[in-house]
Amino acid sequence: MEKLLDNEIRGKRTILGLKIFFVVSLVLSVLVYIVWDMANGQMAQTPDAPMAMGVLLLVIGIVCAGFFAAISFINFAINWLLWLFRSTQNLKALQPDSISPWLAVILCCLPIVGQIAIYCILRSLAKRTQLELENRNVDFLPVPMKLLNLYLVLNVVSTALASFNQMGFLMGTGAVLSFVVMVLLLKILTLLTAQEQKLFKIHEEQILRQKVDQVLREREIEKAASQIQEATYETSEK
């Protein structure tokens, strides 16, 4: 039985990175909306020094928030790819017909197509991991397929709406949906990492039991051989 690699730390880092990116992106979006509203509302009608100073401070806040958003996204992306690689690697050790780890990482990095690829890979991971747990009679919380399907639909819709640069309402709707997509992804990753850790632990226990059984068999063989040797010696003595 091939040994699996522990992926718990990478999973926790990925989830934490997504949470941080969610919060920073939310702050950035709120600041951008405030500046946009001020620039097209009261400030456009009656511009004055205090209002201009407030906008300037908000713009500085946007720059800082944008910087932290970029850093947090890079951190999340790196941990996400590392977690995905090991998850598919472990699954391939159990099911050789599953997707290659390198192919999974490459597909997820492709623009546009990557969104569909991520959905398909997460769906495959969920189904195959849950099958392994069911075969071992392990209790677990499943990943609802409706949740995965909703993630795909909203992800595609939010990306499409965000492409309308000249239509504020559609862009705003796309931004809101993108946050919903992150929440759905967070839920999916939380369930998947929990299942993965259960599978890892039960697999380690199976390997340990096999080693113990092997040691016991070897001792029984040695004991039987010793008894045969003693019986042979007594017979020869007689």
Image (cartoon, rainbow, N blue to C red):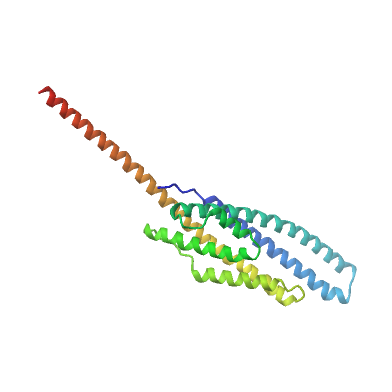
Count all numbered tags in the image, as a single digit: 0
In the picture, residue 222 is in which quadrant?
top left
- Vertical comparison of 230 with 55: above or below: above
Compared across the picture, whether 1 is left or right of 187 comes to left
Front residue of 125 and 45: 125
Q: Residue at x 72, y 67 (%)?
A: 29
**Relative image position of residue 93 (x, y in whole percent):** 46, 51
**Relative image position of residue 196 (x, y in whole percent):** 48, 56
Front residue of 189 and 44: 189
Front residue of 70 and 112: 112
Front residue of 97 and 43: 97
Q: Residue at x 12, y 26 (%)?
A: 235
Compared across the picture, whether 13 is left or right of 55 comes to left
Q: Residue furthest top?
A: 237
Compared across the picture, whether 232 is left or right of 164 comes to left
Q: Residue at x 15, y 29 (%)?
A: 231
In the picture, residue 31 is in which quadrant?
bottom right
**Relative image position of residue 2 (x, y in whole percent):** 43, 47
- Let me know if residue 11 appears in the view: no
Q: Residue at x 34, y 42 (%)?
A: 212
